[in-house]
Image: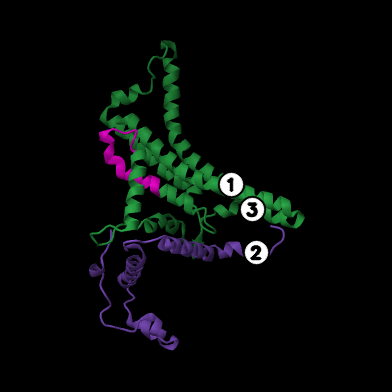
Chain colours: A green, B purple
C-alpha cells in the first residue's frame, strides 16, 4: 500500500532514457515566442502581458542594479509555475516533486546571491549577520544564529516546494481512491468526497502557482539583501 | 531561437507526402528521406513550424494549440508510464 502511494513520484524511464528531462522541457515548448511577422498576434500579446505582469511582481523588491537579473527570475518563475500546474494533469510527471531538482535550483541561486554580496561589498554583507539595535551581550549568539539561518535558506527553499507539491499530489491520490472505494459502500458519501476532491484540486492549482511565485520572490529578496 | 520557414532546408526533391504513401512502399519512402540526425531534427522543426503557423501565429488565435499540446503530452505520459500503471488496472485491492 505504502509503495504504491509514493510510486507516482518515481521518475519515468524509457529504455534507459530518463524522461524527466523531457518533462522539464515542456514549459519551453508551451511558451511559443513570436513568429516571423511584424504584426502582433493575440497569443503573443497575451504571453507578453502575462510575462510583464509577473516580472513587475517579481522585480518589485529590487533596485536598478538588480534588473540585470530580471530575465533569470522571470524565466525561473514561469518555469516553476508551468511545471507545477502541468503536473496536475492526468498521468503527467511533476519534476518539482523531486527534491534533487528543487535543491539543484535553490542552492546555486542562493549561493550566487551570497557570493555576489560578499564579492562586491564584503563588509556590508558581514554586517547583515548582526541585526541593528541588538544588545551587545547577544551579538555573538545572534551572529551564529544569523549564519545558520543563511545556510538554512537553500534547504528551506527546495524543501518548501517539494513538500507542498508532494503533499498535494498525495492528498489528491488518497481522496480520489477514497471516492472510488466509497462508491460501493455509500453513494452520498462518495459524492461528498468528490466535492471535497474538486475543491482540493482548485486549491492545488492555487498552491502550484503560489509556490512558483514564492520560490522566485524569495530568491529576489535574498538578492536584494546582497545588492 | 525561432527559425523561420526560409531557414529550414526543404527535402531535396518533391516526393509523395506521408499520407499518400501506400503501406507496402513505406520502407522505401523512409529510405528516400534524409534520416541523418540533422534531417530528423529539421523534419520535426518543419512539422512544428507548420503547427505554429496554422494555430499560434494567427491574428486571433484561441486555446486550441495549447489544449492540443497538453492533451498530446498527457497521452504521451500515459504511454510512457503504462508499464507502471498496468499493475494497478482492473484490480479491486491495490
| Residue under label 3 | A176
Q: In the figure, residue B46 lies in which quadrant?
A: bottom left
Q: Is residue B14 magenta?
A: no
Camera sees residue A60: yes
Say the numbered circle drawn on residue A200: 1
Say the numbered circle drawn on residue B89: 2
Q: Secondary structure at mark 2?
A: loop
Q: Residues within 10 Å of mark 1 (few under 14, many from 20)?
A: some
Per the model, the C-alpha gap separating discs 3 and 2 is 15 Å
Quadrant position of the N terminus of chain B in the picture = bottom left
Q: In the figure, residue A221 lies in which quadrant?
A: top left
Q: Is residue A62 magenta?
A: yes
Task: Determine the chain carrying the residue at label 1.
Answer: A
User: Does the residue at mark 3 contact the one at mark 2 (Cβ under 8 Å)?
Assistant: no
Residue A28: % across, % down: 37, 56
Task: Please name the residue shown 29% across and 26% down the image.
Answer: A122
Amino acid at each position: 500500500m505504502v509503495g504504491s502511494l509514493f510510486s507516482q513520484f518515481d521518475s519515468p524511464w524509457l529504455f534507459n532514457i530518463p524522461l524527466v528531462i523531457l518533462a522539464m522541457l515542456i514549459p519551453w515548448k508551451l511558451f511559443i515566442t513570436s513568429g516571423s511577422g511584424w504584426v502582433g498576434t493575440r497569443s503573443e500579446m497575451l504571453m507578453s502581458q502575462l510575462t510583464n505582469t509577473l516580472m513587475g511582481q517579481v522585480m518589485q523588491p529590487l533596485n536598478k542594479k538588480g534588473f540585470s537579473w530580471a530575465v533569470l527570475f522571470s524565466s525561473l518563475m514561469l518555469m516553476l509555475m508551468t511545471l507545477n500546474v502541468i503536473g496536475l494533469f492526468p498521468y503527467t510527471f511533476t519534476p518539482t516533486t523531486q527534491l534533487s531538482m528543487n535543491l539543484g535550483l535553490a542552492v546555486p541561486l542562493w549561493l550566487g546571491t551570497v557570493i555576489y554580496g560578499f564579492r562586491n561589498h564584503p563588509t556590508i554583507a558581514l554586517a547583515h549577520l548582526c541585526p541593528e539595535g541588538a544588545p551587545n551581550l547577544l551579538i555573538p549568539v545572534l551572529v551564529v544564529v544569523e549564519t545558520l539561518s543563511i545556510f538554512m535558506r537553500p534547504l528551506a527553499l527546495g524543501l518548501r516546494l517539494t513538500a507542498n507539491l508532494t503533499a498535494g499530489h498525495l492528498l489528491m491520490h488518497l481522496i480520489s481512491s477514497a471516492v472510488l472505494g466509497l462508491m460501493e459502500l455509500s453513494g452520498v458519501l462518495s459524492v461528498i468526497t468528490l466535492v471535497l476532491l474538486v475543491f482540493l484540486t482548485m486549491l492545488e492549482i492555487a498552491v502550484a502557482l503560489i509556490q512558483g511565485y514564492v520560490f522566485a520572490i524569495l530568491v529576489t529578496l535574498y538578492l536584494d539583501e546582497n545588492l | 531561437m525561432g527559425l523561420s520557414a526560409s531557414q529550414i532546408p526543404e527535402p531535396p526533391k518533391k516526393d509523395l507526402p506521408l499520407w499518400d504513401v501506400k503501406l507496402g512502399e513505406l520502407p522505401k519512402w523512409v529510405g528516400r528521406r534524409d534520416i541523418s540526425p540533422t534531417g530528423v531534427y529539421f523534419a520535426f522543426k518543419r512539422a512544428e513550424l507548420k503547427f505554429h503557423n496554422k494555430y499560434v501565429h494567427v491574428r486571433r488565435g484561441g486555446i486550441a494549440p495549447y489544449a492540443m499540446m497538453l492533451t498530446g503530452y498527457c497521452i504521451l505520459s500515459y504511454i510512457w508510464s503504462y508499464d507502471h500503471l498496468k499493475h494497478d488496472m482492473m484490480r479491486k485491492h491495490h
